[in-house]
Image: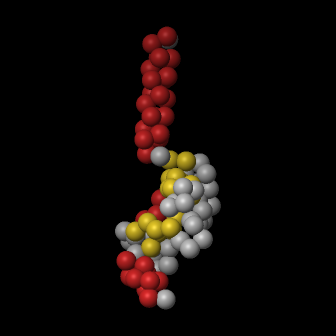
Amino acid sequence: MKKLISLITLTVLIAGLFVGCAGESNEPCFHCAETPTRAYKTSEGKTTYVCGECSSECHFCGAPNPKKYTSVIGEVTFACKECLDSMKED
Ligand SMILES: [Zn+2]
Ligand SMILES: [Zn+2]
């Protein structure tokens, strides 16, 4: 029985380490309020939480593999190259 408890403790510890390494958080996503999220530091040193879905799609057109950038209001947003380029032209 003692062996089983230590095995469970070890499993929980490993699971905790794994989640820690992945940087997952239970803070709601800045864009859609979903969890889990990942913490991102803005250029101003603020922390923004963004879920996996919002960080894997362009915020504006939904294209895959977007780039991370800090928006004009100082929050972390993900956008594809096309949308970033069109914003620069403004
Ligand atoms: Zn989200
Ligand atoms: Zn886009």
Q: Residue at x 40, y 68 (%)?
A: 67
Name the spot of residue 57 as percent of width and height, x first: 44, 70
Name the spot of residue 25 as percent of width and height, x first: 55, 48
Toward the bottom, the furthest residue is 90
Look at the image and tell me whether residue 59 can be seen: yes
Front one among 39 and 57: 39
**Horizontal relation, residue 11 to residue 30: left or right:** left
Name the spot of residue 27 as percent of width and height, x first: 61, 51
Toward the front, the furthest residue is 44
Q: Residue at x 44, y 88 (%)?
A: 89
Q: In the rendered view, would you say 2 is above or below 86?
A: above
**Horizontal relation, residue 18 to residue 36: left or right:** left
**Horizontal relation, residue 74 to residue 83: left or right:** right
Examine the image and state in which quarter residue 14 appears.
Answer: top left
Examine the image and state in which quarter residue 80 appears.
Answer: bottom left
Name the spot of residue 83 as percent of width and height, x first: 43, 81
Q: Residue at x 52, y 52 (%)?
A: 39
Q: In the rendered view, would you say 38 is above or below 73?
A: above
Q: In the rendered view, would you say 59 is above or below 11?
A: below
Q: Residue at x 45, y 23 (%)?
A: 10
Front one among 6 and 43: 43
